[in-house]
Amino acid sequence: MHSIRVILILFTLLQAAYTQEPIEVIIEGKFQAHESNIARFNSPLTTANNIIYLAYITPDLKTVVAQKKGPNWHISTVSEITQDNPWHNAPSITVDEQGYVHILYNMHATPWQYSMSSKPGDISNWLFRGQFAGENPGLGSTGPSDCTGDCYNEWISEGTADIPGNQVGYAFMTTDRNGKIYVAFRECFYCDASYHQRQRSGGIVTYNVETKSWRRVGGIRPWATDSVYSPLGHHLFFDRNNRMHVSWVWGHHYTEEESSDAFWFNPNYPSYAFSDDGGKTFFTASGKKMNLPIDFTESEPVIDANWIQNPQENGYFWGYTEITAMPDGTPYILIFPRTESKPEVRKAFLYYKQKWSQPLALPWGGEDMVIDSKGIITVISSGIRVHRSEDGGLTWKNSEIDMTGPYNIIVDYNFVNHSDDIRFLAFKQDGADSFVRIYTLKFSHSKFDTLPPAPPQNIRTNTQH
């Protein structure tokens, strides 16, 4: 009888341990930021050698880097001038294999604004490796940028920065599983044409630490281009086998009559490609080889725009995606419709197994997904809430982290690629009171189930204003 009671007690304790799934929430730091510091297209947070790096725009429109070594934060100014341009001029940051810090910033159809730390792991001094864009950089035209003479001639060229490309925007910077840097971005193809005739295209470049030089993947300029459609919002993810997954959205080129509305209010198409050789060759999800530069006709959109059955109300898809993968390499893409006229048409994700799945709704409208080494999916929504699924996203277990949102969430992908814990930034856009906060979520390694967990415990705070 006693043995049965012991077994029942042990079973109850084990069941409680499994269902609670303890979470430790660490607030790594808090920084006042400008309200334009929206980095949906970018990658402003990274971790390397146990050091956290955050790039952001200050309230007085400077681009700075904050570095956390141990318990302390240190801040360094990269650029004294940053344009007030939400969704466009936020920075991206990463660290190369030798520890040098690289940052891209203040660009919207602008020559490369790019700096690199003078020493590994040291943000006290920056070497500018971009292209001079006038005395007022960060604007998308030469006149307001005070760019004349040689500056103007270089502006309409194919570019003179240390990174290939020109008239750049939406730069996303990351590293593969070996620490090699890759950047995906939008660029001009016909750089000396009029504003609406430049055939905005997609570029992907990679960095060689030995030669300290950049090159285009595949050796082709650009990576993707089309005479009718423009690729936008390229994101990269490297899975556990170092396969490169790429997602983006094709939309109509801007026109003189409609400007950017030509992209947003015509059918557009979330798309996908992968490479197993570091970008020398690319394939569709079905395995069809793609020629570089990739054009619209040989792409295989992950979903038909007709999935949204009332497009006249609010357009089609937003021009960005998120991309991740299961431990076995199965790609997962997040898509963001511009209309919610039907209950089932909302933020969603798809995965590829012989064909693209039907869209599955993202819990609470989350826009960021992480998949750990055990295949557990975590979605972070702007509440801030964390939603965990062990069955591929069919059921979710939810926990509330900070219910003072909404926040714009950006994941530290370099950190999560090497840990089953999660690190992300939460940006609160609140006028003069806007700020960035950095979170680290530590998860237990116990068996996972889909029952609701207890609220987060053991909150530790280390903030800097």
Image (cartoon, grey):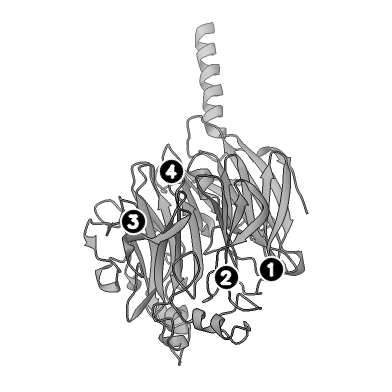
Residue under label 3, please give it. Answer: 279
Observer-side mark, 2 or 3, equals: 3
Nearest the viewer among 422 and 227 is 227
- The answer to whether residue 95 is above or below residue 169 is above
Q: Callout 1 environment at 10 Å: few (<14), some (14 to 19), or many (20+)?
A: many
Identified at 41% across, 83% down, the residue is 198
- The answer to whether residue 334 is above or below residue 224 is above
Dot 1 and dot 4 residues touching (CB under 8 Å): no
Residue 46 at x, y percent in the picture? 57, 50
Residue 37 at x, y percent in the picture? 64, 66
The first of marks 4 and 3 along the sequence is 4
Residue under label 4, please give it. Answer: 178
Q: Amino acid at mark 3?
A: Gly
CA distance separating discs 1 and 2: 10 Å
The first of marks 1 and 3 along the sequence is 1
Observer-side mark, 1 or 4, equals: 4
The first of marks 2 and 4 along the sequence is 2
Identified at 68% across, 45% down, the residue is 68
The first of marks 1 and 2 along the sequence is 1
* View extreme (left): residue: 288
Nearest the viewer among 107 and 265 is 107
CA distance separating discs 1 and 4: 35 Å
The first of marks 1 and 4 along the sequence is 1
Q: Secondary structure at mark 3?
A: loop
Would you say 38 lies left or right of 181 here?
A: right
- The answer to whether residue 357 is above or below residue 444 is below
CA distance separating discs 4 and 3: 14 Å
CA distance separating discs 2 and 3: 27 Å
Q: Amino acid at mark 4?
A: Asn
Marker disc for residue 388: none
- The answer to whether residue 170 is above or below residue 455 is below
Residue under label 1, please give it. Answer: 35
